[in-house]
Amino acid sequence: ELNEVEKSTATRKLEGQSYVVSVKRNKVLTTKYSFVNLSERDMPRLQINHLRHSKKSKIIKCFEANSNKPINADPIKPKGAHDDLVSAYRLWVPLGAKSSIVVQVEEIQEESNDQSQASIGNVTIDKYIEKGLMTIDDKAKITKSLERQKTVAFLQSVADSGRHGHLFPKDAADAEQIQAKNWLNDTELQLVMKLLNLQTKVSNSEFQISEEERIQNSVEKSQTRLRANIKALSADGIKDNPLITKYIAAMGQEEDKLATSTANETNLRNERKALDKQLAELNKELKTLLANRLQKFEIELKP
């Protein structure tokens, strides 16, 4: 049986209908009692008190297995009790001289198992269809419901990632795969591709900024070394030492390199701020588009 899952009005508007597949089957439980009479005379009728397997089981057949002759099963119950309170049955069976019997009691018990539409899988559904337990329409309902829930979950995850400043999908290939599943429309996909392009520029900008910081650290170390050398030579009292002149010229070059690197870093950080602003604007635009899609799901859902 295909049963609809109960949901709140708000959840049902957003996610649509969900289903659970209730699988019911009858299980046959068999109990056998064996007796052997080795004596030369008939035994008095044997009394067997048979306990039911469970409150849900019902005796469907009671017989002697060798001859297939039926055996009556009389309920054992207090006076005035209902049949559903019977937990045991009394069986009377004869046992002749030099003979053996096998009393077989069969009970039937209904078992049920509920499988969610997310866990059942197409292979199992196809098997149920082959056995006539489900229809193609049932499969279509489940497929439609699952696709809707996946789409809604995806849109919500992208909206949440956009809200927290993270980009989704990971790359262009990921975006195309998602678009192939119809989770993104053409407008949303174009916007995501712009975001991906911007994210690449941000990554490049971060690398360039770190490179300029490395250059500046290198210049500072070089200047510290040059100052130490100049100080050591000046302490010797040697005037017009050509090494001092060389070190001073080298410090001038390092200063020029530092000034250039600092200016480059300033420009790069300004560019990074502009990229961050564009990312925030596009993330906001994407979030608005997805929110409209989610709202559209609610509007399109038929009561």
Image (cartoon, helix red, strand yellow):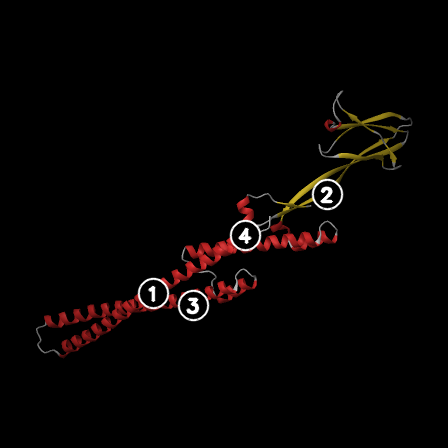
Residue at image point 41% right, 62% down: 282
Select label 2 or label 4 by which is in front: 4
Amino acid type for the residue under numbered disc 1: Ala
Q: Quick one: 243 or 260, which is closer to the camera?
A: 260
Q: Residue 288 location in percent, x, y?
A: 45, 57
How far apart, in angstroms, are the residues tagged by discs 3 and 4? Answer: 33 Å
Q: Residue 197 has which mark?
A: 3
51 lies above or below 195? above
Residue at 29%, 69% (x, y): give it: 267
Q: Which residue carries the number 2 mark?
A: 25
Earlier along the polypeptide chain: callout 3 or callout 2?
2
Residue at the disc numbered 1? 274
> Which label number is shown at residue 299?
4
Q: Please, is residue 46 above or below residue 294 in the view?
A: above
- Up-down relation of residue 106 to residue 217 (above or below): above
**Secondary structure under badge 1?**
helix
The residue under label 3 is which amino acid type? Asn
Do the CB atoms of the residues marked 3 and 4 lie less than 8 Å apart? no
